[in-house]
Structure formats: C-alpha cells, structure tokens
Image (cartoon, rainbow, N blue to C red):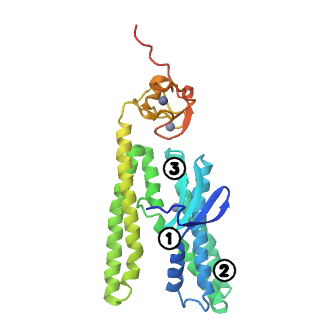
Amino acid sequence: MLPTQKGSLKLFRFAGIDVYLHWSWFLLAVYGISLRQGQYSSMVWNVYEYLALFAIVLMHEFGHSLACRSVGGRADQIILWPLGGVAYVDPPQRPGPVLWSIVAGPLVNVILVPVLSVMLLLSRSLGWPSIMPDTYKFIYSVWGLNLGLLTFNILPIFPLDGGQILRALLWFPLGRARSLITASIIGFVGLAGLIALVAWDWFSASNTSEGGKQTSLTWPIILCVFVVMNCGRGLVAGLAMLRADNMPRRSEFACPACKAAPPVGAFWVCGKCQKPFDTFATGALCPQCGIQYPITGCPDCRVSSPIDQWVVAAPVPPKL
Ligand SMILES: [Zn+2]
Ligand SMILES: [Zn+2]
Ligand SMILES: [Zn+2]
C-alpha cells in the first residue's frame, strides 16, 4: 500500500537522498487546481499553490530523513505521494533515535507556522489585501495549508506521524513490542473517530448539496484503507516482537548497539548453506559448512557487530 519507485519519477538527488514523485501527484495537481479555480485572477496562482504544497511536504520529509541520518540511521529515498510523502527512514531501533526521526518531520511545519504568520501579518500591514490581492490570498492559503498539514499529521493515528510519536514515547515505559501494539490499537480507535467525523460531515453535506458526495469521500476512504492496513501490520509485528521478547535469552552476551541479550535458538541463517543455526552457541561458526562469520546481526536492532564485542560476561564453564 506504500508507493514504490515503480510509477514514480525521479526528480533530483540532494544530500545523498533521491527524491521521487509518484504519478498520483499529477492527479492531485489536476484535482487541486480545478477545485480552487476562480480563487485568483489567474490560474498561475493555483499552480504556485500546488508548488507550495509540494515544497512544504518535501521539507517535512527532508526533516525526517536528515534527522534519521543524524542519529546514525539509513535514509536515502523520499517518495512524494498524495497522502504526504514517504521518507524511507531506518533509524537505529531504540526509542530515542526513532522518536527524533519522526518528530523532525512535523517540527519543520511547526517552524514554518511563525515564519508564515509573520509574512501574513506583514503583507496585511502593507495593505496587500487591496493592492496585491492574489499575493495576499496566496500567502494566506500557504499559511493555512501548512497549519492543516501539521494538524492532520499529528493526529495520534498510526501510521501518521502523531501515531508514530505516540508509539516512540510509549516505547520508553512499555518496550518496543507493547508500545507498537498499544499504538496500533489506539490507531484503530482514532480511525473510528475519524470515520464518525467524515460520516457526519458527509451526511450534513448531502443534506445541503447533492453534487459534492463522490469527490468528498474519495480521499477519506483511501486514507481509511491505508490506516487499517498499517495498524493491522503494526499489530501483527508487535505481537511477533512480544513472542520474541518472551523467548529465553543469553545473558552472557549483549548487542553492542542496543544492549539486548540475543535469544537462545537457531535464529541466524548461514549465507552459504542457508541452514539456520544458533550463532552464540557455536561462536559465529556455521556447524554445517564451517564458515566463521566476522560479524553477527542483532535480531532486535538489526545492527551487525563482531561477536567478541557481544561478550559481557565470561560464559559459565562446563561442569566436569
Ligand atoms: Zn512525516
Ligand atoms: Zn541490537
Ligand atoms: Zn553453512
């Protein structure tokens, strides 16, 4: 349900991050520009509005990507599609870095609020509403666009940024599995609230006018499907994490990156013979084909480190 490079146009590369535009943005351009036709004396301003929306979403996504990199995560791709952009970020799987990688997106919109407010107040005091009504309307519309995106985005509905911020905050007291499960359930509850709101809006709109029904329901339905799929996926992943967390652990080892003790069992797969084995039982040696692995991946945070860096306590010597 997420856009991929397929069907996306590569726009440019900045700071090592490839920016793609999903084809559905062209649909949004036609829809958005026709919706707001007649607001300005010239259509050019509608195009400017669309470009401003594009710029705001892009800055938001760069916020995510650059923050993710600042904490040592991977982020090399941004795809812009009408449900906001998707920054493919992979921060280190600890609550602090994850929280920062998510907060940095909406933070860009928060910073834009006073910037755009000053521009709006300045243009008003310069008398632009009467001298340059198009410019004034444009600033006003961009101000509202940024505020609208921010408000929508921080709703605590997984996987919107607000839901992900909630999850990262819950991670501190609840741990990675329970925080993900809780955030996904809250997402479903939030979605029910959103559906009630949209339904109420739709019914009150259908009472006053006849035509607007189809157009006003398209985006909410797409959004609902998107939220349901992501909350469902979050719930499944959270339950899987909970099972993994409850597995017996080797207390004499700890991941150098996330400090988690590795689980006991054959959770590592040999790259040569494809057989699973317990790397901490064999000292990173495949028992099948005898390959010695220089680094061992952490099942919790996915960071790989040399196995001797994992040792925290001398293993219990075997009984004679
Ligand atoms: Zn975001
Ligand atoms: Zn780890
Ligand atoms: Zn092997």
From what the image shows, is residue 13 above or below residue 27?
above
Look at the numbered discs 1 and 2 and tell me whether their residues touch, using CB distance below 8 Å.
no
Q: In which quarter of the image is the C terminus?
A: top left
Mark 1 vs ligand 1: CB below 8 Å: no
Q: Nearer the viewer, residue 68 or 219?
A: 219
The amino acid at mark 1 is: Pro
The local crowd at label 3, few if under 14, some if 14 to 19, many if 20 or more residues have their Cα within 10 Å, is many
N-terminal-most mark, 3 or 2 = 3
From what the image shows, is residue 152 above or below residue 88?
below
Separation (CA) of disc 3 from disc 1:
24 Å
The percent coordinates of residue 266 (x first, y second) are: 41, 31
Look at the numbered discs 3 and 2 and tell me whether their residues touch, using CB distance below 8 Å.
no
Kind of element beneath mark 2: helix
| 310 sits left or right of 203 in the view | right
The percent coordinates of residue 11 (x first, y second) are: 63, 66
Which is closer to the viewer, label 1 or label 2? Answer: 1
Residue at image point 67% right, 60% down? 14
Residue 40's label in the rendered image is none
N-terminal-most mark, 3 or 1 = 1
The percent coordinates of residue 20 (x first, y second) are: 59, 64
Residue 122's label in the rendered image is 2
The local crowd at label 2, few if under 14, some if 14 to 19, many if 20 or more residues have their Cα within 10 Å, is few
Separation (CA) of disc 3 from disc 2:
38 Å
The amino acid at mark 3 is: Val
Indicate the quadrant where residue 52 lies. Answer: bottom right
The local crowd at label 1, few if under 14, some if 14 to 19, many if 20 or more residues have their Cα within 10 Å, is some
Look at the numbered discs 3 and 1 and tell me whether their residues touch, using CB distance below 8 Å.
no
The amino acid at mark 2 is: Leu
Q: Which of 140 and 247 is in front in this view?
A: 247
Q: Name the residue under label 1.
A: 82
Q: Name the residue under label 3.
A: 98
